[in-house]
Amino acid sequence: MTDTQIFDEMWGSDDSLRAPYQKFHDWFGAEDAARLRAKQREAEELFRLTGITFNVYGRAEAEERLIPFDIIPRIISGAEWLRLSRGIEQRVRALNAFLADIYGGQEIIKAGRLPAEMIARNEAFLPHMIGVAPPGDVYTHIVGIDLVRTGPGEFYVLEDNARTPSGVSYMLENRETMLQMFPELFSQNRVQPVQTYPADLHRSLAACAPAATTGDPVVAVLTPGIYNSAYFEHAFLADQMGVELVEGHDLRIVDGRVAMRTTRGYTPIDVLYRRVDDDFLDPLNFNPDSQLGVAGIMDVYRAGGITIANAPGTGIADDKAIYSYMPEIVEFYTGERPLLENVPTWRCSEPEALAYVLDNLSELVVKEVHGSGGYGMLIGPTATKKDLAAFRKKLRARPGNYIAQPTLSLSTVPIFSRAGLTPRHVDLRPFVLVSPEGIRVTPGGLTRVALKKGSLVVNSSQGGGTKDTWVLEE
Amino acid sequence: MLGKTANGLFWMYRYLERAENIARLIETGQRIALTRLGDSDAEWRSVLESAAVWPGYQAQHEELTKETAIDYLLRARDNPSSVMSCIAQARHNARLVRTAITGEVWEATNAAYMTAHDALARRVSERDLPGVLGTIRQHTALVRGMTHGTMLRNEIYDFARIGTFLERADNTARILDVKYYVLLPSARAVGTSLDNVQWETILRSVSARGGFRMEYGGRAGPREITQFLILDKRMPRSLAFCASKLRDNLRYLGTGDSGTAPSLQKVNHMERMYLSHEVDAIFDYGLHDFIQKMLDLLADLSRQIEVDYRFYE
């Protein structure tokens, strides 16, 4: 972890052009700024027309917004990717083994590698899943691993997304847009394809069909509905896979199966790719007020009548308190040293850690254990005195609710601005598919970029943008 | 196909059709006002009645003026049948059924919405009105064209067509309902100039002037107009034409195992009992009663389709 110099993925730390960007650099040098500005506007028009929008929670007047798209690709070499993807695969294997163990024999606790209260007192632990073996033994069918980079070979996992990771539609649409706007770039650079993702997803889900399946597995996507912030993505994936997009009120239990109401009656679903949180999945078993789920689906699930992807209860694996144990978890289940690094993490539930965090607050990033979307976090170095004081109070009141990490100096990638190429901080979310046939990491992923100078917050809900992410063929 | 999706398609195309029909009614009203051939205020009232929004208008406005009538029909958010509301509803339904329609149809619908949203952001001046209405018509036509050119001829298409023709039949029947009195045989055989204006208004309201001239030349009389708008099987906005399309598409949908679907039976009954006679039979039945009956039958058919194809449960 270097904090001396920020690593730029195009220019390195010493202003010398890095190899993956060579051809791009030549192309860019011959381009005219006015033409590129026109292309940037054209990209926005394309996004607006295709309707790639997200809804911002709590802002009714701005019902649909575009995520800003930057036309400069982020380029990763084939060799860099190979290392990364091995690490991702190892980590995802460990996550699945961890879930099977936690809802099974809990060997990791018996072995003393994870404190029992990390599970027993964790809100993300779902007792309903104890002893349930999901079809194909897969818990996390779709995973997004959030990575940050600090140097040429230094990648850290910032977060595992094992519940319902979103953003894959942007990965795909960003590539489509770039192909349309800059075909010549793709002739000059050999970029590994991402476009097979929907077909891979479909095959991967179908391979996890439950015992009750007869014939070709029927897959459907469950969305909370048109007002959900990620509705576009739900519709997009259902459309690309050629499967139905259903809501809770389209479904009911018929003859021990979850079935959807078609114009000709009820048809059973074999695999449900749900984009609805655990809590809302089944009003009979969880939140009784939920209108979004299907009453009784958990009973069908336990009886082997349906595959739910991702499995209920996977939140225990991407919980931020569990995150700090990931190095142990990877070693325990794979017997290998972790290939990807964890960011050092202080668990504020531990008194010494809390004391350290309180003393060094202005240098740390503090996150809520169950939070997401960049809400409820503190970035010490940029926080005001008032913010720091407020957070100290919160930390003392509920220390178990927080973890803290050092402020990493995230790598930068150029964006196209009025001044030409300007560096901005980025992260990366590669998408991983898991089935009994294997683990598949799509080459690339979603690069999120903080558009404000110096900012480290890349979340789209807080003004971040996205970029196309290229992995070059070797 | 999901019942919910069938419902969304049905309404997406009903709203698109309605947006076009309302735009056409505005054009007709404006033309009459400009040519000063009729009583303009009375004409705006009948336009609002034809659009089935007269009670809503009265609740919002004390006076009837051309400007407020046009604005209410074109942009009012509290008017669910304003052109803007219809296009927004069509797009909302298109989003709901995004997986059922092609990318081309979705983008055309989205573009229609974005264009209308910009063009109707402010009150439209008289000078801009023809341009705005023309643009909106082009965009809805583009959705229709993309539907025709890119969609598979399967049940998805059938529901789109059923929505279109139910709305269209309803629209034609409403125009006749408001203007029936000028078509009664008791009106003079050779119309006064006022009658002629009224007859032309009816034809304009359903884009039928050209077709009618082709068919009847100058012999425009109430009997011919009634025949043309209700019974002519080649006139794409006549009740008989719409009913035949509804019948075809309901038949393509089929019924699975339980015999003829009640909705298909209903449309068969409508055609046999009401749309297979000579025009004189309609006058004998009573033109106004006949049109009221058609409006009832269409509403009943719409409800039956919802039930037969599990739109809601």
Image: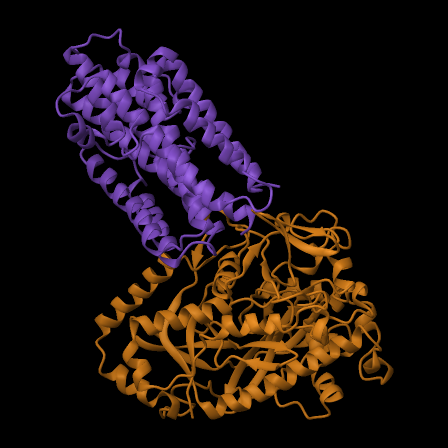
Chain colours: A orange, B purple
Q: Residue furthest left?
A: B218
Which residue is at a point 60% across and 52% down the rendered structure image?
A: A247
Residue A401 appears in the rendering? yes
In the rendered view, does A241 fall on the left or right side of B248?
Answer: right
Q: How many marks?
A: 0
**Vertical placement of residue B252 versus A325, above or below:** above
Where does the image place residue A230, in percent across and percent down from the top left?
53, 59
Which residue is at a point 60% across and 61% down the rendered structure image?
A: A275
Q: Nearer the viewer, residue A86 or A409?
A: A86
**Vertical placement of residue A147 versus A170, above or below:** below
Question: Where, by quadrant of the figure, is residue B63 drawn?
Answer: top left
**Vertical placement of residue A415 versus A153, above or below:** above
**Vertical placement of residue B34 versus B83, above or below:** above
Where does the image place residue B293, in percent across and percent down from the top left?
44, 19
Q: Nearer the viewer, residue A260 or B245?
A: B245
Where does the image place residue A223, in percent across and percent down from the top left?
58, 56
In the rendered view, does B90 fall on the left or right side of B265?
Answer: left
| Placement of the C terminus of chain B among the 4 image quadrants | top right
Q: Nearer the viewer, residue A446 or A260?
A: A260
Question: Where, by quadrant of the figure, is residue B239 drawn?
Answer: top left
Question: Where, by quadrant of the figure, is residue A420 drawn?
Answer: bottom left
Q: Nearer the viewer, residue A277 or B99?
A: B99
Where does the image place residue A451, in percent across and percent down from the top left?
42, 69
Residue A456 appears in the rendering? no
